[in-house]
Image (tube, helix red, strand yellow):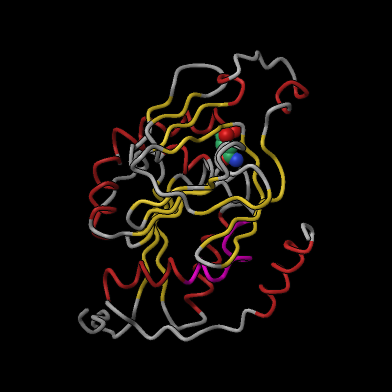
Amino acid sequence: MSAPHASAAGVVTLTIGYLYPSVLSQYGDWGNVRCLQQRCHWRGIDVEILPLEVGTAIEASAVDFFFMGGGADSQQRLIARDLVMAKGDAIREAIDAGSVALLICAGYQMWGRRYRPFRGDDLEGLGIFDAETIHWAAEEKVTIRDITSAGRGRMVGNVVVEWEGTTLVGFENHGGRTYLGAGARPLGRVVVGAGNNGKDHTEGAIVRHAYGTYLHGPLLPKNPALADHLIRLALQRRYGEVPFPPLDDGLEGQAREVALHLHR
Ligand code: GLN
């Protein structure tokens, strides 16, 4: 891998393309972007955040790291056409060229082939993940009449996932059940919680450097190993290996222990 090609000023910059921040921000997932920004700042790495709202064009080669957060079915419906029809080709080009992506819940569902909400037409996805999602009420042909019936099959609670010899901790809140096809690799194995569908013990999906997951929290502050893994992948595409000193994750480790202790 070639030596780092920092910009003329010798500065390494991570460019994050933040998809639909004004629409998909219902579960505090923007905290992941803040975590990426801070863990880069502590290492002297600059971060540029590009808000990619409906109608905003994407220059595929400019984005090192895509981020897309969670939201309600109605919010997914608001962005679905723009994501697939207006941004789809540029996103696929960037992912094929090695850009990193972290997609949380609704964002994860929309990077699969299709999402069938509990009412209304199916939403076409990007098809980057070989996965399909169907809302539990659509799958079980249940009519949701009120908050009680809506909650019956909803997957809500703390989650612990085995990932690359360590664990990821987070929180899930979704009605959709995601089923992976043969072409999809799960992010990890569920130890506590439902994960993709509450049946096959898989959680999330990975293709190339695109990571999808149901873990809110936000995910990255309590899982610094994953945060740094994704940052390094994103920087390598543009700069090769860059100086990436370890950080003191004592506080993050304490937060993880509290989350893990709940389930011992
Ligand atoms: N609306 C989707 C569902 O209910 C995604 C929810 C989310 O982003 N937390 O499954």
- Relative to residue 12, is residue 29 depicted above or below? above
- Relative to residue 140, is residue 260 depicted above or below? below
Magenta region, residue range: 218-228
Place of residue 64 in the rendered image (x, y in percent of width and height, measured from the top left):
33, 62
Q: Residue at x 34, y 72 (%)?
A: 235
Q: Residue at x 74, y 20 (%)?
A: 149
Looking at the figure, which quarter contains the N terminus? bottom left
Q: Considering depth in this image, is 22 or 121 the residue closer to the camera?
A: 121
Place of residue 141 in the rendered image (x, y in percent of width and height, measured from the top left):
60, 14
**Is 200 one of the magenta-colored residues?**
no
Q: Residue at x 65, y 52 (%)?
A: 191
- Relative to residue 60, is residue 200 depicted above or below? above
Place of residue 244 in the rendered image (x, y in percent of width and height, measured from the top left):
42, 83
The reply, left or right, for residue 33 in relation to residue 99 is right
Looking at the figure, which quarter contains the C terminus? bottom right
The reply, left or right, for residue 202 in relation to residue 13 is right
Q: Which residue, as the protein is rendered here, is positioned at the far left? A: 2
